[in-house]
Amino acid sequence: MSLKTYAILMLTAWMIVHSINHVDAKEATFYSDDLIGRPMANTKPFRNDQLWCASNDYPLGTGLKVSWGDKVVYVEVTVRCDDKTDIDLTKFAFQFLAPLEIGRLKGVVIEEDKDD
């Protein structure tokens, strides 16, 4: 392989990785316990021990795959969130990705769960 071909391949690979990491990068937070028992948009009472989330980008009832680094959690959209974050997870779901002490995760990837 020529040096020119190698350089083109390396540049192409870098551009692909760079675009994936920055286009899909989102922020995730978790719900406060103050919401426990309050009705959500899907009419169910809120519980912080479920695999649920709030999102403005997906319809209610949509299954999502949320990843951060090598950690993954599958959640269902049950309510809308404020504009301060891309996705709000229950405390239970957030802990699949990181300890609660972190509070806000940057670089989260959110995808619709096609197997749902």
Image: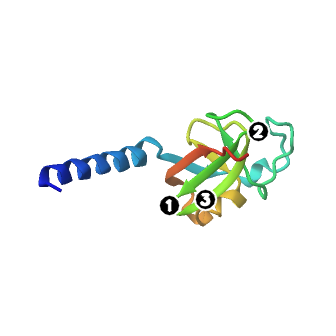
Which residue is disc 2 drawn over?
61
Q: Position of residue 77 (x, y in %)?
A: 72, 42
Q: Secondary structure at mark 3?
A: strand
- Callout 1–callout 2 Cβ contact below 8 Å: no
Which residue is disc 1 drawn over?
69
> From the viewer's perspective, is 108 left or right of 37?
left
Choose between 34 and 24: the one closer to the eye.
24
> From the viewer's perspective, is 45 left or right of 58?
right
- Dot 1 alpha-carbon crowd within 10 angstroms: few under 14, some 14 to 19, many 20 or more: few
- Occupied quadrant, residue 60: top right
Q: Position of residue 94 (x, y in %)?
A: 64, 58
The residue positioned 47% from the left and 43% from the top of the image is 24
Farthest residue to the front: give it.
Answer: 1
Q: Secondary structure at mark 2?
A: loop
Please tell me which of labels 3 and 2 falls first in the chain: 2
Q: Secondary structure at mark 1?
A: loop
The residue positioned 52% from the left and 51% from the top of the image is 108
Vertical comparison of 101 with 26: above or below = below
Q: Quadrant of the N terminus?
A: bottom left
- Dot 2 alpha-carbon crowd within 10 angstroms: few under 14, some 14 to 19, many 20 or more: some
Q: Amino acid at mark 1?
A: Gly
The disc at residue 72 is 3
Q: Amino acid at mark 2?
A: Gly
